[in-house]
Each structure stands twice: as structure tokens, then as C-alpha cells.
């Protein structure tokens, strides 16, 4: 009797089978892949992705990835398409249909619709000679690799390869559109992704909120300004340019005769600053490294334009 494999041995087998299939797909990428990307880049409408069952779930993932990386995309359920939702697919669109067998009967009406209205049809299937494979304008074949389930029936290897093909399409489109992380922020304003891409300018305090004093400002007035603005610092500014900063540490180091001095005499020169276009998460990293709770913001001419507090970063979801 063959000894039963341990869970970790089974996992190793699954990952090996799927990894081999991905490598096979990479090494045999179809010659028309570039043409597919060229076609999708020219689409004036949306990329419609559809499939039935597990393929439908993958279709939703591919459409979501494309939509968040600069390619307008949506899913249409093949069952609903036969009952009115075909109207969502227009002659300005392109369609990607997913079917491991290429004979999923629920896709028939979408296939016919694309043929009737000359809508570009891209097939992702393991069976090039299937109905879907032969009807499509472009074929992106899945590798002829075994499913990793052991009985050859549960979609495992095939679904992994389909997701990978969708990622390859989305990333190729993204790069050819010149889609950068600044664009990514526009589509991800909420959550961790959006927070990681926020710039200092999005949260910094400015204008009347800034604690500003001048070189000759008496320390008595400087303390009032620091207390009124509530940041625990004062920026020393002359002719709009930042010349120094006064922190609680500076106050402690200059306690003797403090009230007889001016802001310029107490200030720390060449303070650490950030810029409005710096990512907030990068600025927070500097603040944490140097144990700062605030950082002044200056432009390219060293003019004071803002102040960012660690609480601003935390409220924005950058932690």
C-alpha cells in the first residue's frame, strides 16, 4: 500500500504542476499576443470579459485588474447576456471569452453577437479547435497541462494559467498606456493602496495654520505662536524662505535667559524638510527614523509652503 502523502507534500505537488504549466505557457506565448494588445489599445469602449462558473470568477478578476490599471473593462454574465445584457456589448468594445473546453454553451450568444457586429473576440481556452477557438479573432491558448487536483477534473492548473494570462494582458496594456503610480492613485483613492500613494501636499497644513515667526521675533511672542498653532514647533522665516525651526528641544536647550532672546538666536539652522510632491509614506518613514512628530514643507526655492504632522499621516491611513 502506498503511503499517503502529507499535506505539505501534496501542496508541493500542486505548486510544481501549476508552476510547470506557467513556465510552459511563458515559453510558448502565442505569436499574436502583441496583436491582441494592439487591438485592445485601440478599443474606444470597454474590454468585456466573460466566462461561466470558475471562468466567470476569473473574468471578474481580469476585468477588475484592467479597470484599475488604465484599461476600461467590465464583466457580463453569459446567462444574463442571453436575457438582455448583450446590449452592454457594443461595436466600440472588445470581448475576451474564457472557457477551458471552448464549448461552454452559455457563451454561444455572446460569440454570435460579436460575429454579428464585428466586435473583436479574444479566446482564452485549452482547445484551439473548439467552437470558441475557431470563432475567435485571436486565440490565447492555455497549456495542455494536467489539473493539479489529482483526478483531473477540478479547475486548478487551468484557472491559475488563465489568471496569469489576464495579468499579462493587463500589465502589457498598462505599460503601453504609460500608466504610472500617480494614475494608479486616481483609481485607488481609498484603502491602503491610495494611502501609500498620497503626496505630502494632500494632507499638509498651510497658510494661516502655519506657526511662523521671524528672526527678530521675541521668544515671548514665539512661545505664544507655538502654543496657538498647537504643533510644538515654530518655523523661522525671512523673505518667505525658511531659515530655521524652533522645537521643544530647542526650548529646553536654551532655558537660561530664554525670554531675553529672539527666535533667530534659539532656532536650529538647516532643519530637515520635505516637499509637497514627496510621497507621504516616505516622509513618515523619515519622521519615524529621526523620531520627529512634525516636518516642515518647502518648495524648490526653500520657501515655506506647509507643515505635516504625524497625526495627519495616521488619519490618512499611512501607518
Image (cartoon, rainbow, N blue to C red):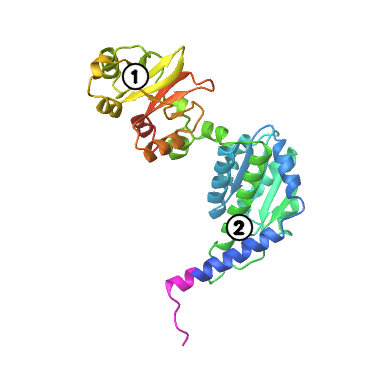
Marked residue nearer the N-terminal end (2 or 1): 2
Asked if residue 118 can be seen in this view, the reply is yes
Residue 198, position as x, y percentages in the image: 47, 32
Residue 209, position as x, y percentages in the image: 36, 16
Give the crowd class for mark 2: few <14, some 14-19, many >=20 residues within 10 Å: many
The residues tagged by marks 2 and 1 sit, at their Cα atoms, a distance apart of 67 Å
Residue corresponding to mark 1: 265
| Residue at the (55%, 50%) spot, across then down | 58
| Residue at the (66%, 44%) spot, across then down | 172
Asked if residue 83 can be seen in this view, the reply is no
Question: Magenta region: which residues?
Answer: 1-11
Which residue is nearer to you in this view: 25 or 249?
249
Q: Is residue 292 magenta?
A: no
Return the residue found at the far left: 256
Q: Quadrant of the C terminus?
A: top left
Residue 88, position as x, y percentages in the image: 61, 35
Using the image, determine if residue 116 lies above or below residue 204: below
Q: Is residue 173 left or right of residue 80?
A: right
Return the residue found at the far bottom: 1
Amino acid at each position: 500500500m502506498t503511503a499517503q502523502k502529507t499535506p505539505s507534500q501534496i501542496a508541493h505537488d500542486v505548486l510544481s504542476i501549476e508552476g510547470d504549466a506557467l513556465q510552459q505557457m511563458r515559453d510558448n506565448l502565442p505569436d499574436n499576443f502583441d496583436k491582441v494588445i494592439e487591438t485592445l489599445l485601440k478599443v474606444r469602449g470597454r474590454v468585456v470579459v466573460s466566462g461561466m462558473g470558475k471562468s466567470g470568477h476569473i473574468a471578474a478578476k481580469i476585468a477588475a485588474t484592467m479597470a484599475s490599471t488604465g484599461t476600461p473593462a467590465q464583466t457580463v454574465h453569459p446567462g444574463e447576456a442571453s436575457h438582455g445584457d448583450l446590449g452592454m456589448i457594443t461595436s466600440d468594445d472588445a470581448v475576451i471569452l474564457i472557457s477551458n473546453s471552448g464549448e461552454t454553451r452559455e457563451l454561444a450568444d455572446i460569440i454570435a453577437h460579436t460575429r454579428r457586429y464585428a466586435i473583436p473576440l479574444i479566446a482564452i481556452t485549452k482547445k484551439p479547435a473548439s467552437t470558441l477557438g475557431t470563432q475567435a479573432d485571436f486565440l490565447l491558448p492555455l497549456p495542455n497541462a494536467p489539473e493539479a487536483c489529482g483526478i483531473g477534473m477540478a479547475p486548478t492548473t487551468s484557472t491559475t494559467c488563465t489568471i496569469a494570462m489576464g495579468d499579462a494582458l493587463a500589465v502589457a496594456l498598462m505599460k503601453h498606456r504609460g500608466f504610472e503610480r500617480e494614475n494608479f492613485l486616481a483609481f485607488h483613492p481609498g484603502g491602503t493602496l491610495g494611502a501609500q500613494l498620497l503626496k505630502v501636499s494632500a494632507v499638509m497644513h498651510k497658510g494661516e495654520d502655519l506657526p511662523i515667526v521671524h528672526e527678530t521675533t521675541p521668544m515671548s511672542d514665539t512661545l505664544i505662536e507655538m502654543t496657538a498653532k498647537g504643533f510644538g514647533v515654530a518655523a523661522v522665516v525671512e523673505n518667505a524662505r525658511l531659515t530655521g525651526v524652533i522645537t521643544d528641544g530647542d526650548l529646553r536647550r536654551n532655558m537660561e535667559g530664554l525670554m531675553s532672546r529672539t527666535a533667530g538666536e534659539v532656532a536650529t539652522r538647516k532643519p530637515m524638510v520635505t516637499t509637497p510632491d514627496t510621497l507621504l509614506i516616505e516622509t513618515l518613514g523619515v519622521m519615524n527614523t529621526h523620531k520627529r512628530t512634525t516636518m516642515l514643507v518647502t518648495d524648490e526655492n526653500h520657501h515655506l509652503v506647509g507643515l505635516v504632522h504625524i497625526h495627519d499621516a495616521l488619519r490618512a491611513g499611512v501607518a
